[in-house]
Image (cartoon, helix red, strand yellow):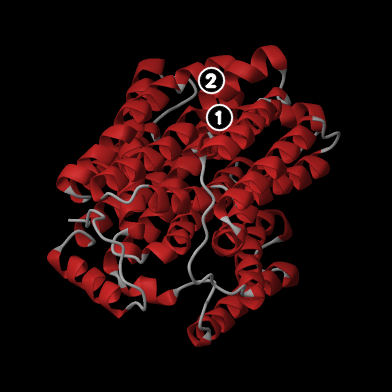
Amino acid sequence: MSLFIVGLDNTIVNLALPSIQRELGASVSSLQWTIDAYTLVLASLLMLSGSTADRLGRRRTFQTGLVLFGLGSLLCGVAPSIGLLIAFRAVQAIGGSMLNPVAMSIITNTFTEPKERARAIGVWGGVVGLSMAIGPVVGGALVGPFGWRSIFWINVPVAIAAVVLTALLVPESRAPRPRRIDPVGQLLVIVFLAGLTYGIIEGREAGYGSPRILGVFALALLAVVVLVPYEKRRRDPLLELRFFRSVPFSGATVIAISAMAGLAGFLFVNSLYLQDARGYSALHAGLLTLPMAAMTAVFAPLSGRLVGARGARLPLVVAGSGITVGAAGLSWATQSTSVWPLMACYVVFGIGFGLVNAPITNAAVSGMPRSQAGVAAAIASTSRQVGASFGVAVIGTVVTARVHGPFSTGFAAASSVGWWIIAGCGAVVLVLGLVTTSGWARASAARVADGLEDEPSPGLVPAR
């Protein structure tokens, strides 16, 4: 339930953007921040929340996150201005950061039998993909009759129910040797992600050569330059760099960034295309994206089974192909394109995205010590949110620049470059799906597992 509402809030807001823009007088960059304030804060705090849960107790941290998420949702629903809405989205994300990695820690410490754990991880990855895909459909169904504020209020009763069920059903657990807090590393991660996203979004209006934007980019670069050697010296780093020596793990990180950048860009551009360029209502636009959600609902759990039975290569190859072909097909859409070609592209894209999450999650925790499963899962979850932030920032900025730039054109024509960027994200998934499932890649994962201090958790299905 918690993963579902966190994933839902990654994407449900997209269908409400035109309504928010009209009621609150928001600019396009403000709409981008409405999405990215959530994904950026989520990405920045996931690793801290994972290590905090290992120290203080996973159930306690999980319940705290649910309360904060519900409170943030309630505040978003009453926000009187776009600035406060963005701020309350950040409150939502603080709570949300305590849910994803902690849920994975609970799963890996509850399901000790290898096959059961593989199936549970498949369900976990499937729920993430499903919630993100059906967000636009649920958003469209709510915005039309009830207004955009209803998309936030719907989270409150779900969060309350999840708090109660967690108290009744989830056992408390902690890591045998909890990791120490890394405040310097946490600050550097926030500076890098926030600086890079701010520069991309605000650079279009301020000018990418302006002193302010150049200064922000320089600050983000400095944060990375300082972060890497600093984390190498720490005994309990926020970002465990040793994990990245595993080719499947590093590949899963890049695949997660690419896949989520593609989805976030797809939802942002498609929502504005259907409502602004074609004049559909929010409900109509949401229903048109239903084929994508349906395919994700079918193929997300199937992906978990495929990973458990045959490894990660097949679902990753099909996922990359589906995202690429679906986005490339949409690059030819005009203001008057028939809905049937659009829906065909949505179907293909939905199949691709539905298959991608389970192999990402499996690769992230395969061979890792059970005591560090929260950290590994947090890095994978962080990669998803980083991808979502950059997808909205980059693709939204590129498309908006074509609409309002010196060679301005209609939104349908301007969005073609955005669709090609999304197709490129799918191509990355396809290529890395082949590379990271090779024998050479599996050997690197085995070396990393042997080099870690703790014993690797047994039985997780290796990527192949």
Residue 426 coordinates in the image, percent (x, y):
33, 47
Please give the residue where the numbered disc 1 appears in the rendered image: 271
Disc 2 marks a residue whose amino acid type is: Ala
Q: How many marks?
A: 2
Disc 1 marks a residue whose amino acid type is: Ser
Mark 1, residues whose alpha carbon is within 10 Å: few (<14), some, or many (≥20)?
many
Q: Residue at 41% of width from left, 53% of height from top?
A: 109
Residue 106 coordinates in the image, percent (x, y):
46, 50
Q: Name which quarter of the figure residue 24 lies in.
A: top right
Above/below status of 381 relative to 246:
above
Residue 314 coordinates in the image, percent (x, y):
18, 45
Q: Is residue 13 left or right of residue 341?
A: right
Please give the residue where the numbered disc 2 appears in the rendered image: 285
Q: Is residue 370 left or right of residue 367?
A: right
Q: CA distance from mark 1 to mark 2?
A: 7 Å
Q: In this orientation, which residue lies closer to the viewer: 269 or 11?
A: 11
Q: Residue at 55% of width from left, 44% of height from top?
A: 399
Q: Earlier in the sequence, mark 1 or mark 2?
A: 1
Q: Residue at 72% of width from left, 19% of height from top?
A: 147
The mark found on residue 79 in the picture is none
